[in-house]
């Protein structure tokens, strides 16, 4: 077990999602995603959301590249299909980007009890 960075107890087994400091259960909020200092300061992730979700962003980039770039190499397909694929990929990225932005402002409640 680690030591809590806030109160000094030996039960710092949780990590704050926003500041990455070790916390005990008494220094965490009820939803167990952030420490009380980050909750009071209303700290936001900002651009750190990209760092924390590297795997998800990599998967989205792979799917986007797979849907857009193989199209010109397939023979016999109408060239307008390329522009349709590009527009659909961009339209898929808009809600995913908005979801990541709003989840960084108010993260989902943890189901750990």
Image (spheres, helix red, strand yellow):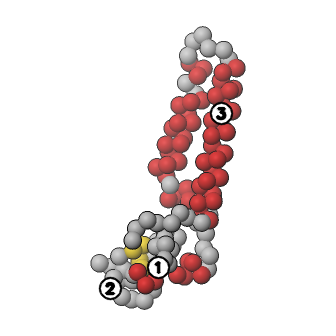
Location of residue 83 in the rendering, given as x and y in whole percent from the top left corner? 69, 26
Location of residue 6 in the rendering, given as x and y in whole percent from the top left corner? 45, 86
Residue indicated by mark 3: 88
Q: Image height check: is 74 above or below 21?
A: above
Q: Along the line of sight, which residue is nearer the eye, 72 or 99?
A: 99
Q: Quadrant of the C terminus?
A: bottom left
Tell me the element at label 3.
Answer: helix
- Between discs 2 and 3, the one toward the N terminus: 2
Q: Image height check: is 16 above or below 57?
A: below
Q: Quadrant of residue 100?
A: bottom right
User: Can see residue 47?
Assistant: no
Q: Quadrant of the N terminus?
A: bottom left
Residue indicated by mark 2: 10
Residue indicated by mark 1: 28
Location of residue 95 in the rendering, given as x and y in whole percent from the top left corner? 64, 47
- Between discs 1 and 3, the one toward the N terminus: 1
User: Can see residue 110?
Assistant: yes
* Closer to the eye: label 1 or 2: 1
Query: Dot 1: within a 10 Å radius of its alpha carbon, few (fewer than 14), some, or many (20 or more) residues?
Result: many
Q: Quadrant of residue 39?
A: bottom right
- Between discs 1 and 2, the one toward the N terminus: 2
Q: At 36% from the left edge and 80% from the top edge, which residue is drawn?
A: 12
Tell me the element at label 2.
Answer: loop
Q: At 46% from the left edge and 66% from the top edge, which residue is drawn?
A: 110
């Amino acid at each position: 077990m680690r030591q809590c960075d806030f109160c000094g107890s030996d039960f710092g087994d949780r990590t704050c999602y926003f500041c990455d400091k070790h916390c005990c259960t008494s220094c965490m909020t009820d939803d167990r995603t952030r420490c009380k200092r980050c909750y009071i300061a209303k700290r936001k992730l900002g651009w750190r959301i990209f760092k924390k979700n590297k795997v998800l962003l990599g998967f989205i980039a792979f799917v986007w590249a797979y849907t857009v770039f193989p199209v010109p190499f397939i023979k016999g397909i109408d060239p307008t299909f390329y522009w349709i694929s590009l527009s659909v990929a961009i339209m898929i990225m808009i809600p995913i980007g908005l979801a990541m932005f709003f989840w960084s402002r108010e993260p989902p409640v943890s189901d750990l009890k």
